[in-house]
Amino acid sequence: MMKRHATLLDRTFDEGVALTVEARNYIAFHEQADRRVLDLPHCLRVGYHHTRVSARLVQVMTWMLAMKALLAGELAPEQFAGDQYRLSEGEICDPLLPEDIAKIPAGLKSLLERSDALFSRVRRLDTMVLEKLKAGEVPNFGLIQGIKIIDEDPL
């Protein structure tokens, strides 16, 4: 059997899954602990950042699944280009405020930074894919501006 090489899309998807699981585990464990030791305003601020991480990761994973469906021919280019799969702007993308950097736990800060980096990379991929779609091209041949994102050979 031929060994399959991981592509940019595969690696990014795997990173998103791993980060989603890590965020879920972190939030599930720390949310209860935080409630016992933090005052209400601090607990609310930490909860807000938990939501930011979760929102980023939900959007990234939704985009990744839609991209895989587009490349597999299971989703029409017009559907993929619609608002349903667009990554949002706004607060979930804003950088941490200086007062938050000092006050939030290191693990949450790490999740915020890594989810932001992943979100930014996927946003760049989305921009490249949308440019191809607007030009009438469908990136089902596995290349986006010379970057191989999916193997043509599934095995």
Image: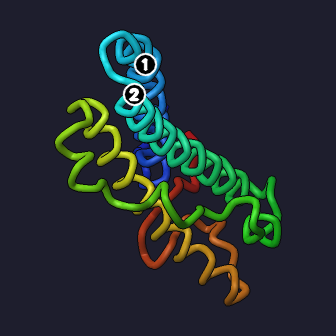
Tell me the CA gap for discs 2 and 1.
8 Å
Q: Nearer the viewer, residue 38 or 155?
A: 38
Residue drawn at 73 percent across, 86 percent down: 136
Q: Taking 63 as reference, is 79 left or right? A: right
Residue at the left extreme, as displayed = 102
Label 1: few (<14), some (14–19) or many (≥20) C-alpha neighbours in 10 Å: some
**134 versus 69 height, above or below:** below
- State the SS at label 1: helix
Residue 93 location (% of width, % of height): 44, 60
Please tell me which residue lies in front, 43 or 85: 43
The vertical placement of 125 against 97, above or below, is: below
Nearest to viewer (mark 2 / mark 1)? 2
- Residue closer to the observer: 37 or 51: 37
Res 130 visible: yes
Q: Which mark is residue 31?
A: 1
Name the N-terminal-most of marks 2 and 1: 1
Tag shown at residue 78: none
Q: Please, what is the three-letter code of the amino acid marked with disc 1? A: Glu
Q: Please tell me whether mark 2 sits on a helix, a strand or a loop.
A: helix
Residue 129, percent from left and from top:
59, 73
> What residue is pinned by disc 2?
43
Up the image or down, 102 lies above or below 138; here it is above
Image position, residue 112 (x, y; %): 34, 44
Residue located 33% across and 38% down the image: 111
Q: Residue at x 41, y 45 (%)?
A: 11
Say whether residue 24 is left or right of residue 39: right
Q: Is residue 84 above or below residue 40?
A: below
Amino acid under disc 2: Cys
**Residue 34 on image: x %, y %:** 36, 18
The reply to whether callout 2 and callout 1 are in contact (CB within 8 Å) is: no
Q: Residue at x 51, y 48 (%)?
A: 56
Instruction: Using the rendered image of the protein, determine whether residue 3 is visible from the camera's viewpoint.
Output: no
